[in-house]
Each structure stands twice: as structure tokens, then as C-alpha cells.
Image: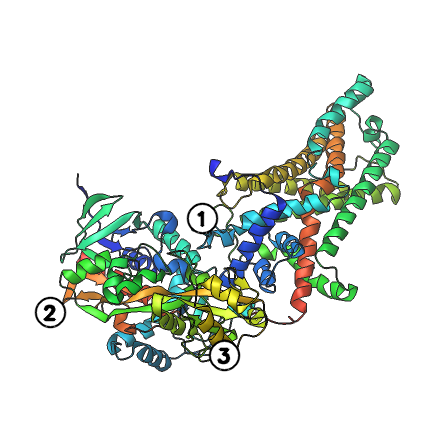
Amino acid sequence: MQERCAPDVLVAGGGVAALSAALAARRAGASVLLAEQAPEALRGGNVRHARNLRIMHEAPSRLFPDSYGEAEFLNDLRQAGGGFCDEALARLFVRRSADLPQWLEDHGVAFQLPAAGALPYSRKTAFLLGGGMAMLNALYRAARKMGVRIAYDCEVTTLHPDGSAEMTSAGRPVTVASRAAIACSGGYQANRAWLKQDFGDAAENFVIRGTSFADGGLLRSLLDGGAAPSGTPGACHLVAVDARSPPFDGGVVSRADGFRFGVVVDRNGDRFHEEDDWSGPNRYSAWGREVAARPGQIAFLVLDASGVERAPPSIFPAIVAESLAEMAGLLGVDPENFIRNVTGSGRVKNSPFHAFPIRPGVTFTCCGLKVDKAAHIVTKGGDPSPALFAAGLIMAPNLLGAGYLAGVALTIGAVFGVIAGEGAARHARA
Amino acid sequence: MPELESPQQTSEETRQEARRALVLCNVCDYCSGYCETFVAAGRRRAFTDNDLTYLANLCHNCRACFHACQYAPPHPFAINLPKVLAELRQQSYRELAWPRPLAGAGWAALPMAAAAPLLAALILPRDVLLAPHRGPGAFYEVTPLPLLVATAGVIGIWSAVSLTIALIRFWKKTGGGAPKAMLRAVPGALSDILSLRNLDGGGHGCNDVDDSFSRLRRWLHHALFYGFLCCLASTASADAYHHLLGRVAPYPLTSLPVLLGAIGGVGIVVGCVGLAFLKALADPRPNAATTQADGAALLASLFVVAASGLALLAFRETAAMGLLLTMHLGATFGFLASLPYGKFVHGPFRAAALLRAVMERQTPPVSPIR
């Protein structure tokens, strides 16, 4: 049996892009249905795990020290995007980011202020008080208060060029007679079959760091229906995570760290990269890529008694052994090669030895939809679809290519969410 | 609330669960803006039993960290920090009480409020208990002053000694401290205690009922706490009236003891009723089922003491005075007697934990983790 509903604007997704789009469209006078694929307890996509937003600011304020001007932000984007960054879109994005903190605060989102003293120094990003979950709670509350209809367990499967859509609500098919629609359903990182098309069987060994609902169903449907792609097909943002992380939603605490305090070997017992090379914030993704390229997509960080004291704490217990031979047995690596390489490194000396198994963890995928400056989805023919919009990680590759900058995903979601929401409301009510 | 029923955990299991949660919180660090508990936890890499006692008593149970937690159930990590810290807090009240066998007996005000009038009815002639008494000394015609002074003195001294021993045990267990460092931390700690800064959730209030931010619980606690202080001041001023000014109770409505007592009583009643309502409305998930009874006992006890006092004030010139007076005295003495054994202990322990937190803030870290 088919149900029908007819909001002015349909928003597909439940993260910061979807909420910003829904709020902006509702403020512009449209009736809005927000369809979130996850149940209420798991709403919000990868925003659940986010913490900060990258914001342009010309002067210090209560949110940031110093300044982070337009030119510097643009330059950071260009470097991260590695030639894939759409200049015009990037310029618009950076400028619009400046007003975003106020817009979010107007909708109940709270920031953690550097003056309170509990934050690491951050010139380029503003920190959410309580992290992404707290922001989601505030935005869902604001959306409900403003009259946005929120449907959980609701997967949008098809967007038609006239802005109407097909979805399944708790498994039942529903036709939505919307006049404009906004795709905010993220990447396809939770779709193992699609990852395997990109990475082969190696993808079997990838941990998914965020939501299990990012299956890319709507992205696939739009690409198959003639939408132009953006970004780098077959690329994804990888981070080194503990191999014992849950298959989904391990988030920030599953990240592996402390490489420079020990020695890293693969399952053959071979070292494959100089442990001291990376010490900045890029170390997580650098090691993620390296481990993805090793046999079996697994590696082991081995620390000695003093190394484990210096390494940052982990939520996972270390594998402990009194001798390297015993450790080789525990890790299942070739003892002779392992002992030779670990001892030869000169980095690990005193027992007891501690080890952490490492796998690559996927944060998001780097192929999405091409959009124009009004966040319209662009067809392969190069024409913007007047009734179809996209915001968030599903269109972030327009700016990022296969790269990433800390805090930029939330900003892209919110900035283009607002642009798309306003545009969709205008189109739907014209 | 069937989903709250979990198998009874041993103390060691509760401590292990708290360690697991706090290590994860330290790695995540998203909640560091909410309160001092996360800042203090962040100074530690591992958590001894004594650290856990300290951190559990530093937590004001504002619940913001539960609603902001991406690792709360249904996540497989199932982090619920407010719940496990509430369990540890209660265990610390039990473990550190003196004498220990009395721990947990926080209900005495309620039976005493009923027992005292009954006892009076058995002992006193009807024309004393149920007759109106007016003018100076009216109260003492029902309950002789020497009996009152002796009872209050014995119970008061006993409870003060008992509470002090528990507090000293708490302070030593959580690390002691040099007198100079303690003194230096007093102004900061007093400010945190009197303002309940840690119920401010980084500037937005706390999650009283659901994930929305509110300052209601903080204001209700202020009403209760400052009401309680007013009642203490009322008792002290009455003592001064009696011994220094030679004036004998009941005092006129515009006198200091009556004004302070009335304001304090209303504050306590408003605070107790409001906090009880908030507890009933609150999302049950971050609650520890095992601590609910102790909290209810404290609120009910304070309510009975304050409400019976206000009723006594309202009807002191009528024939009901004798029964109301004995009820108020019974409730008050019962409350006083059970102070060191129930949830009231959270006050001194929280104050001491806040003092320690300020001392830690004022001491540069030896080796920063981050």
C-alpha cells in the first residue's frame, strides 16, 4: 500500500547539512519533511562523532584567538583539494562560513569557549560544547519547535527531477509529492560492496568509523539517474584505528596513536615506514593510508615499557608480553623476522612489551555529486537541476577532492545546507 | 522503568565500569567544557579507587555528558558516566560513614515526625497537649526546655562528630593536603560551592529533564540550600534571643528567628517539591536505580522538617500547637540524627571535592598528558 505526503521541501538525511537545510527552508516559509534513515537513537550520521567547525574570521573573538582570513582558508582548501577544488564554490563557502557560528547559536547550538581553559589551542576551528551529539540535540529541538516534520527510519531512495521523491518508511514505500528536494545523505563509506568495487577485497578489512547508515543508496541512484560526479572516484579518507574497534561508529576514541613512541610492523614482521616521520595532526590519516597498503590491511604498534608510558592512553588494553618472542606468538607474526626488525630498530628495548593491532578506518568517501553555487545538483550534461539540491558530505568532494581539513566537514554541511534550504524553499514556493 | 534493572554489581565491578568510562572520556575529551569532573579526570591517566571516590563526588549529576555522548547506549560501548558515578558516590557515603553499621539509615525524620506526637500523647495529659498555650514560654509548657536542650545537644554533638569523622576519612582517602594549599583554595571552592558553578554546563545550564538545557535544578537547589542556611540562622538567632536578650519563645512574627525560619522553610519546601518533580519527570536512563531511595529520603526528610515548622508557625496559637510542635521537634531530631548516614553527606563530600579541585587547578601539572 502506498502512502502519500506533500511537503514543499523534502530533506533526505539527518546530519548537520540536513538540519541546516530543513531549518533554512522552514524559516523561508516552506513546509519541510526531514527523512532520516536512522532510528532516533542513532540519528545524525557522522556528525555524532564531530567536534569542531572551521570558520573564517578576520579578528579574534570569544570563539577564536587571532585571525583566519579568507585568503588563508582558501589556500588551505586548495592544498587539501589537490587540484579538485572548485574555486568559485570555495570562495562562496569560505565567506559564508564567517556568519555560521552566529546562525548556529541562534538555533541553540553551544560552543566551548577557549577562555574557559579546557581546550587545545585552535586558531582555525570553533569547538562545539559537548561535541556533535550536543549540536544535533539542539538542532533537532530547534527544527521540531519550528514545525519541521521529522521522520526517522525513513530512507529516501529516488529523487525525481521535479523535486518529488520515493522513500521507504519503516520498510513501506511512500511517494513524497515534494516540490523541491535536498540530498544530505553523506558518502557511501558504510556500503561494503561499493567499497570493494573501489578497493577490492582489502575493503573487507576496513573499519567504518562513523554511522552504519551511510550506504550511499541515494548517491548511487542520483549518479545512475544522470547526476554529474565530483571528487575522486575510488578514494576515501582513511585513519589508523585500533583493530578491535566496533565495525561502525567507533569515532574519535578508536583512533590509534603513539606511533612515534614505538615501532610499527606489518603481519610479516616488517617495518614499512619511519615512525618519527609524522607527528602533526596528519599522522592519523598518514598511518591509515600506510596500513591500508599492507598485506591483510593490518599492522602492529609495539611499545616498550617506557614507550607505553609516553604514548597517549588508549581505550583498548595493550597486548602485553615479557619477551619479543612471546609477543610474536601473541600477534601471529613470524618470530625471527619480527624480533630482528624490532630489535634492529633500536626503538623498543625494555620489557614488558606492549602492542596494539591497527587497521585502516574509513571516515568518509571522496566521490560525490557535482553542485553549482546555489547547491543545485548538476547533470552530466552540465545543467543545474532546478528542484534538486545537495549539501554536506555528498557534495563535499567539490571542495575537498580526496583531501580533508580538520573541522571542514561540519562547515560544508551547515553552509551548503542553508544555501540549499533557502534555494529549495524559493523554488518550491515560486 | 524495567530497562534500568541491571544485576546488582559488586563495588569492584562498579569501580571497573567507572574506570572503563573515564579512560574513554579522557581519550574523547568532548565534554571537557561541561564541568570540573572532566577537567579533573583529564589530569589522571589511570584511576585508583581513591581517584574514583574523588571524581564521583565532584560530579554534580547534571547529565549533560550523557545526552552529549555518542557512546551512550545503544552504542556498544554503552557509556553512562552519570549513572556509574552516582553509584560510586553512594558507595562512598556508605564506606566512609562512622559508625559504619548505621550507614544507609537516612529515613529517621519521617518515623520520628509520627512517633514524637504519639509519644507526647501517651505521656502528656490531654489538657496540656491539646490546649492552646500563648505568650512567652508557651512551647516549653508542652516540651520542657531542659529536655529540648539535652536532646538537641546529645544528638547534635553525636551527628557532628560522626559527620566530621566521615569527612576526614573522605579527605584523607582522596589525598589529604597541606594546610597552606587548602587555605589558598578556600575562596575558589567557596565560590564553586555557593554558586553551583558545575551545574552551569559551560554556560547553558544542565539537562534536568531531557537533552534541553535548563537552570531550574540549579535554582531549586539554591532555594533548598539557602533555605537550609536560613533555618540554621533562625535557630542560632533564637538561641541569642534566649541567652543574650533574655527573651523567651515564641517570638513575634517580625522577629529575626521567625522571619529567617519562615523564609528558610518556604525555600526548603519549594526546593524539595521542585526537585522531586524534576526527578519524576527526568529521563530515567542516566539515573542509578540504586541511589533513588536515598535521594528521596533526604528530600522527604527536609520537606517534613520544613513543612511541620511552617505549620507550627501558622497554628501556634491554636490547640494544634502541641501536636505540631512535637511533630516538628521529632522530625528535626530524627533528621539531625540521621544526617551522617544518608544522602545529606553529599554536601560535605561535594564541598571537599570542590576544594580539592581548586587545589589541583592551583598546582601546575607534573607531566601533562596532552
The residue under label 1 is B73
Picture coordinates of residue A124, whole percent (x, y):
43, 75
Please give the chain letter of the residue carrying mark 3: A
**How far is mark 1 from mark 2, CA to CA?**
46 Å
Type of the residue with mark 3: Ser
Measure the alpha-carbon separation of dots 1 and 3.
43 Å
Residue A276 appears anywhere in the view: yes
Q: Secondary structure at mark 2?
A: loop
Q: Circle 1: is it few (<14), some (14-19), or many (20+) Cα within 10 Å? A: some
Tell if the residue under mark 3 belongs to the same chain as the one under mark 2: yes
In the drawing, does residue A171 fall left or right of residue A128?
A: left
For image coordinates 73% across by 44% down, the residue present is B97
Which tag, 3 or 2, sits closer to the chain's start?
3
Q: Quadrant of residue A374?
A: bottom left
Disc 2 packing (10 Å; few <14; some 14–19; many ≥20): few
Which labelled disc corresponds to residue A429?
none
Badge 3 crowding class, 10 Å Cα cut-off, few under 14, some 14 to 19, many 20 or more, is some
Look at 44% across and 56% down and name the residue there: A134
Instruction: Write down the residue under mark 2.
Output: A381
Residue B355 spot, x, y in % from top left: 69, 59
Height in image: A54 above or below A249? below
The residue type indicated by label 2 comes to Gly
Q: In the image, is A230 to the left or to the right of A415?
A: left
Q: Quadrant of residue B106 in the image? A: top right
Tell me residue B274's x, y (percent).
Answer: 57, 41
